[in-house]
Image: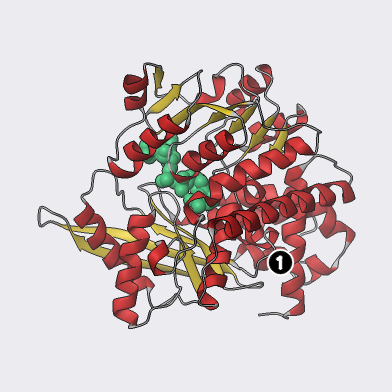
Amino acid sequence: MDDVPQTLDEFMDYVVTKSAAQYEFHQAVREVTNSVWPLLESDPIYLRAKIPERMVHAERIIIFRVPWVDDAGEVQVNRGFRVEMNSAIGPYKGGLRFHPSVNLGILKFLAFEQVFKNALTSLPMGGGKGGADFDPKGRSDNEVMRFCQAFMSELFRHIGPHTDVPAGDIGVGGREIGYMFGQYKKLANQFSGILTGKGTTWGGSLIRPESTGYGLVYFTEEMFRAQGDSINGKTVIVSGSGNVAQFAVENINRLGGTAVALSDSGGFIHDPDGIDAEKLAWVMDLKNIRRGRISEYAERFGVEYYPGQRPWGVEGADVALPCATQNEINVDNAKQLVANGIQIVAEGANMPTEPDAEKLLVDSGVLFGPGKAANAGGVSVSGLEMAQNAGFTSWTREEVDGKLLGIMTKIHTTCRETAEEFEVPNNYVVGANIAGFRKVATAMLDQGVV
Ligand code: NDP
């Protein structure tokens, strides 16, 4: 058994060697492995069966050319990907990201995170992630449609309701899901639930667009409740202004909190009076229909806009919800948050907090909700959409919202109880990683070496 890594460092050396230059992937693996190493040392079965090595290798990765023609008649070529990471507990499930920064390392980090996130939801979903280095920003609807059709012309061979069911992510919302679903249906000659986030008149679930943002705020509320407190009356910094950020703000408002910041890749706005329902409706129109910039909010409502900056220095806030992208809170931002008395940081985005920033927050006593737990609401309602499709039925808003709340509450309890079991109470990072890992590892052990 000489080749079984005996230490965390040996294991990470192996990961880095096998996936050179995939920095975000190394970061995600290190975070999970750090948490689960005490479990691996206490029970030799995992290392003996090489579960960690098996988990860091995707079951399958598909990389393909996506050629399409833009409005000027010019040929464009993008790279398409689907990382089918782990199917131990169900069909691969996870979003598609269209963003110029997309590469294999980023998608492997997202797929790896997704495996444990999906396990935490208690629904039967494996983990995957995909996308393309295509930027929908500045493209016409027709160009986006042609790109989505070209992308699905290859992807359709690899997905299916019992194999792999993608959803949206950055740059992939209802419009893109619609175009991709249409192309799948045409090529496969089959109307089936191969994507989630569909329109509600053609198989989509109510509350799916809201689910990640709503779920994040339900999770945050549970973190407060565990301390005998509530989000009611609290001031919240939100980053991003896309799908997750928008519905996080909506749920903050429903639960009596006040959201005072939003951002995009250009900068952030600070609205001390709060982003109420009317202002939020304006933001949704700006971002989802007119596809404008958050700086326009400042002009419209007469508040400050901070170009090129992130919102973590805003004073007087109790909660920070990063909802834009990976690595958007660095250690200096974390120091600012601690100095300003932040009580809770919960991740709406995937891995928005850099490792040393996360450590600083946790060590400083800030309650920290990691993305794989706190933003699991989106994939949970995707799972509910699959269940509705399989049963040829659709549930009401109230039913889906109630189930979402139940799932987020259960994820929160699982994280807390697991953290207590491993004698690190209030450490949601360790709780989420060990609980997710244990579930997937047990299924892999049961199913043999495959
Ligand atoms: P959207 O595309 O709807 O919104 C993304 C937002 O983040 C936009 O405001 C965008 O600004 C901003 N952003 C993107 N990249 C950068 C960057 N490099 N620097 C600064 N800002 C940036 O995506 P979602 O809201 O769906 O996703 C946000 C995060 O939540 C991602 O990490 C995603 O993986 C995660 N997530 C999403 C789920 C979902 O159901 N949608 C589920 C679970 C997690 P701009 O418009 O200027 O690019």
Q: Is residue 329 left or right of residue 228?
A: left
Q: Nearer the viewer, residue 200 or 333?
A: 200
Q: How are the residues colored? A: secondary structure
Quarter-wise, where is residue 17 in the image? Answer: bottom right
Give the image location of residue 113, x and y in percent.
61, 55
Confirm whether residue 325 shows in the render. Answer: no
In front of the other: 263 or 392: 392
Q: Residue at x 74, y 39 (%)?
A: 223
Q: The C terminus lies in which quarter of the figure? A: bottom right
Q: Nearer the viewer, residue 402 or 245?
A: 402
Mark 1: give few (<14), some (14-19) or many (20+) Cα within 10 Å.
many
Q: On the picture, is 24 further left or further right than 279?
A: right
Q: Where residue 285 sits in the image (x, y, percent)?
A: 33, 39
Q: Point out the image quarter for the N terminus.
A: bottom right
- The answer to whether any part of residue 355 appears in the image is yes
Q: Position of residue 149 (x, y in %)?
A: 27, 66
- Which residue lies at the image location 40% right of the left edge and 36% below the top edge? 281
Looking at this view, is 9 or 423 the one in front? Answer: 423
The residue depicted at 57 percent of the width and 73 percent of the height is: 91
**Vertical placement of 417 versus 95: above or below?**
above
Q: Amino acid at mark 1?
A: Val
Kindly identify which residue carries mark 1.
Answer: 440
